[in-house]
Image: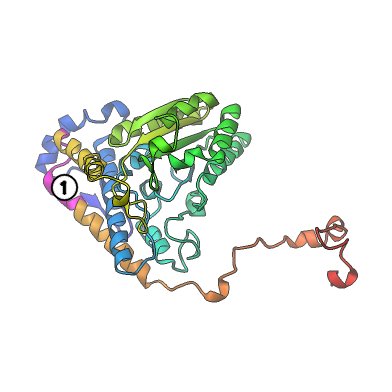
Amino acid sequence: MSTTTQDSVPTETGTAGAAAREGEGRAGQLGADLGLAREDLLEMYSLMAITRAIDERMWVLNRAGKIPFVISGQGHEGAQVGIAYPLRKGHDWMVPYYRSVASLITFGMTPREIMLAQFARAVDPSSGGRQMPGHYGTVDRQIVSVSSPVATQVLHATGIALASKMRGLDQVAITYLGEGSSNQGDFHEALNFAGIHKLPVVFVVENNGYAISVPMNLQSAVEDIAVRGAGYAMPGIIANGMEVLECYRIGKEAIDRARSGEGPTLIEAKVTRMTAHSSDDQQTKYRSAEDLEAGKGMDPLPRFRQQLLDAGVLDEPEEQRIAAESKKVVEDATDWAEEQVDPDPATAQAHVYADAPPARMDDPHWRSARFMGDGGALTAEQEA
């Protein structure tokens, strides 16, 4: 029996059909060494399926002129779901990047919340409709908002991890970025500081081989970003992004290591980018037909599906049910989000500048402060 709400990811909570019952003996073998039950495997597959359905719907909406921009995560879902699955929802912190929809869905963000960001509606929890699509975040779920300048989020994750350590908490911060972003100075500063102080943070570089149009060999002097971990006294691990359970194992080890006080880990997930960089890009201008065709063979979704079928965890009717329910949930999220109202134009400048705390205005030090360019302290007229 499955459970699905209007805005939930379809998950399996019991035995579905005789074929599934017959496969339980074999199903116990797949993922058993990782502590994963059959229900976990089906949930992970459902998370990947619904993320793909969301992604595909975004492209349809963009081509129909209903949303302005798409930046896809197709091909990244296996690594994202696998690595994020061991996190504690509502306890740990996630600092995503623009392709992180599968990570966000795994961490508790809902399809409706994702779609609100696409339509820039007033009730969008990411920014109230102020950010462009792909810039997700919600305070309630401890997901830090995506920033357009790449790699800035890596520093934020390190800062969160420092706070966790100073407060004696066992929270773990995890952050995601592309391999192109690993060449920014912020990446070095964040990993260096995290390594020095053994902070509870996991850095995940999703390497799809292209920084927009720039291939890996023109981005980095080394083939594997993971080797950089040695320079910061942290493990650097390569994960095959096509293998969901491998990503889960590596992610869990890194998260457990951080939580136990052993410090940070750098994970490089080798993934494929199955679409153009974004809806404003034409990748056939810089990728050969052979390269694009090879990328299709690295799709983690059908690969994981076949693993589950072979192990008897999944059968064809169950697979069809998950696909149908994923489509239904995304349709509901899309229709509902599209019906929500736009932000009030009068609030356009809200959340741009922080309001000065009123208590500071009564502080003698505040009244006598000199401000750059003001020529001195405030006059009585200015204070009034």
User: Up-down: is 352 above or below 274?
Assistant: below
Q: Main secondary structure of the magenta part?
A: helix
Q: Nearer the viewer, residue 358 or 103?
A: 103
- Tell me residue 90's x, y (percent): 47, 46
Amino acid residing under circle 1: Glu
Q: Nearer the viewer, residue 180 or 358?
A: 180
Q: Residue at x 34, y 49 (%)?
A: 73
Q: Is residue 346 left or right of residue 314?
A: right
Label 1: which residue? 318
The residue depicted at 33 percent of the width and 69 percent of the height is: 65
Q: Is residue 303 visible?
A: yes
Locate residue 362 relative to residue 182 in the image: left or right. right
How far across and how far down the image is residue 29, in percent?
Answer: 21, 28
Residue located at (51% from left, 30% from top)? 264
Percent position (x, y) of residue 336? 34, 68
Local SS, label 1: helix
* Quadrant holding the C terminus: bottom right
Q: Is residue 174 visible?
A: no
Write the start and end of the magenta stretch as one range: 311-322
Q: Is residue 233 above or below residue 85?
A: above
In front of the other: 362 or 75: 75
